[in-house]
Every structure is written in structure tokens, then in C-alpha cells.
Amino acid sequence: MAPIPMTFATGMYDRMVPLATGEVQPTGIALNFLEVQHARDLFDRMVGNREFDASELSSSEYITRIASGDRSFTAIPVFPSRVFRHSFIVINTNKVKKPIDLNGKRIGVQLYTMTSAVWQRGILQHEYGLDLSTIEWVEGRMEGPGTHGKPSVLPTLKPVNITQNTSPQKSLSDLLADGEIDATISAELPDCLGKVPHVCRLFPDFKEVEKDYYKRTGIFPIMHLVVIRRDFYEKYRFAASSLYDALNESKELARKRMESVGALRYMLPWLPAELDEMKETFGDDCWPYGVEPNRKTLEALVQFLVEQSMIEKTMPIEDLFAPASLTHFRMK
């Protein structure tokens, strides 16, 4: 059987480089690796236009579609992007001093349904007692006026106080600097941070806060996963396990090379110290793929989606992923 052609679009993360260069190749697949720089553009192209056979995709966007009965895509348990998000909560210190002060405030968010915001709201609710129902969520671009991309997201199941930034000149960052919103939660930091005295991170010591969160909960927030178009998967089921194996091998090569510090691969002068700290915190692999090592994190994300009116009820984590990526099918 000749290799099948597959287009795969994602960001050029270090864990993707061996796959992108062809050093790692998925069995039975002639992979066309496509780098897309901006995640929102990638998601909009995949969800809105089905441009690729497989791609990186927002976890919340995928899970809400599966929960709604949309089976346009299936996923494999590969997580290209994961980020602790405490450091991305930025406040106007004239109005907010501590997390509970966010109750009743206007908070800017690029997109209410984006995965980073789901995690930030969930953490603020569960860790700090924030009442999400009291918040006005102001959607818009962080770096300019208008909307954040052209998303094809599903509406919330219950009414949520979401408004739009209608200013023709101001970004969310501008609104925060001018006191028209009281905070931002997002996947990007506002440009006014570090430039305006009253704009600061909610958690200035975010690294220690995030480490404590991980040590107490075992959760390293997952932002994105990898999806395959359903029609492609149904035609070539082996592709799910083949792509999973290749992505895992690519990640492992990148991880081992990062740990070779005789000549630094990254512009991080104290990388050896960071690697020691990472191993102490996470063990040998801070970035595991597969369902079981990530079950607690995935279950927390699903629970947050329920609580934030984005899906109706929780679901078994295995239902999110292609069976062929969980119990490998052989090529026929």
C-alpha cells in the first residue's frame, strides 16, 4: 500500500520540529507539514473551512462541538500547547487588589469560549471563590479594535453577560489602561502591562503560584489538542495511531535534545537550572501525551466547561478521542 497523503497544520513548536523536518515520519503517511503562525487563524481555517486533514485545535472548541453532537472531527491525545495561565490575568490596581475583588467587575477577554479563558475562570472560581455570574465579559482583540479572529464557536447553553468592545479605536489593552475595564484574562498579555503604573499582574509571583497549583492538583492546563477530519479518519483509520506515534516520537526527540546542555539549543542562559527545577516538579516528562497521564487535567477542563455553560454535562474522557489512537489499529 502506497503512503496516503495527509496535510497537518500546527504551530512550529520545538516538539514538532523533528516531524516538520522529516526526521520523524508517520508510518503509511506522506505528511505535508504546514506551519501556521497564529493559533486563531489556524482554528478558524480548520473549523470554518476544513482546510486540512489534521491540525492543532482549541481544546474547548473541540469538546463543545463533540458535546453538541458535531462529529466533524475526532481527536488524538496529543497536546501541542499547554500553559499555566495565572500570569495572564492582568488587573487595574486602582479597582482590584486581590482575586475576590473581581466580583462584579468588567473583564476583557479575547473570546469567552477560548480555552485559556475557561481555565482562568475555573481557577478563579475554584481556587479563589470568584462568582462568575457577577462578571461582565467584554470580548475583543487585545492589540486593536474589533473581534478576535473569525471564530465559528457555538453559543453558550445559558445566558452569560457577554458584551463586545464596540470602540472603533480602542483595544482591550487600551480599555484596561483607561479604566474602562477592570482586568483582562486571555491568551495574550495587554500591551499596557509594564507601561501604565496601575496595570499589573494579579499574581506577581505567578511562577510560585503556578507551581503550587500543580503540586496540589496535578493539573498542567492543556490548551490545544490534535484533531483529524472525520471523513479522513473514517477512510484511513490507521492514520490516527500512526500520527499519534509520530508526534510522540517527535516530542521525545525534542525533549532529549533540550536536556543536552553542552551547547544551549534555546536562548535561555540558565536552562540547566530550569531543567533541574522542571524535573523536580514534573518528573522525567513535563509534557506527556496519551489519556491516562492527562486524565485529571482533561476532567477538570470538561468540568469547567459544564460550569461555564459551554456543555450540558460531563462525559467520559475516552469519548473525546479516536479509538484508533487509544488501541492501535494495524494497517490493512
Image (cartoon, grey):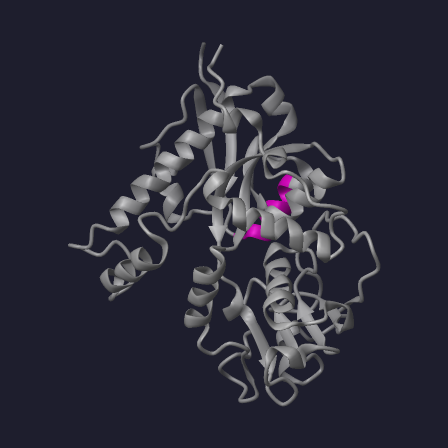
* Residue 81 appears anywhere in the view: yes
Left or right, 29 with reference to 128: left
Query: Does residue 148 show up magenta in the picture?
Result: no
At 38% from the left and 44% from the top, the residue drawn is 15
At 65% from the left and 65% from the top, the residue drawn is 141
Note whether 308 is above or below 247 in the view shown: below
Residue 215 falls in image quadrant: bottom left
Q: Name the one closer to the observer, 160 or 215.
A: 215
Left or right, 197 with reference to 160: left
* Residue 6 appears anywhere in the view: no
Note whether 229 is above or below 187 in the view shown: above
At 35% from the left and 35% from the top, the residue drawn is 249
Number of numbered tags placed on the structure image: 0
Left or right, 14 with reference to 176: left
Residue 247 placement (x, y as % from top left): 42, 36
**Magenta residues, start to end:** 38-46
Residue 180 placement (x, y as % from top left): 71, 82
Name, please, the residue furthest toward the right.
159
At 39% from the left and 36% from the top, the residue drawn is 248
Q: Name the one closer to the observer, 329 or 213.
A: 213
Task: Considering the whole magenta stretch, tell me its main secondary structure.
Answer: helix
Residue 65 placement (x, y as % from top left): 71, 41
Name, please, the residue furthest toward the front.
216
> Where's the N terminus, which quadrant?
top left
Query: Does residue 40 show up magenta in the picture?
Result: yes
Residue 133 placement (x, y as % from top left): 77, 68
Q: Name the one closer to the observer, 64 or 108.
A: 64
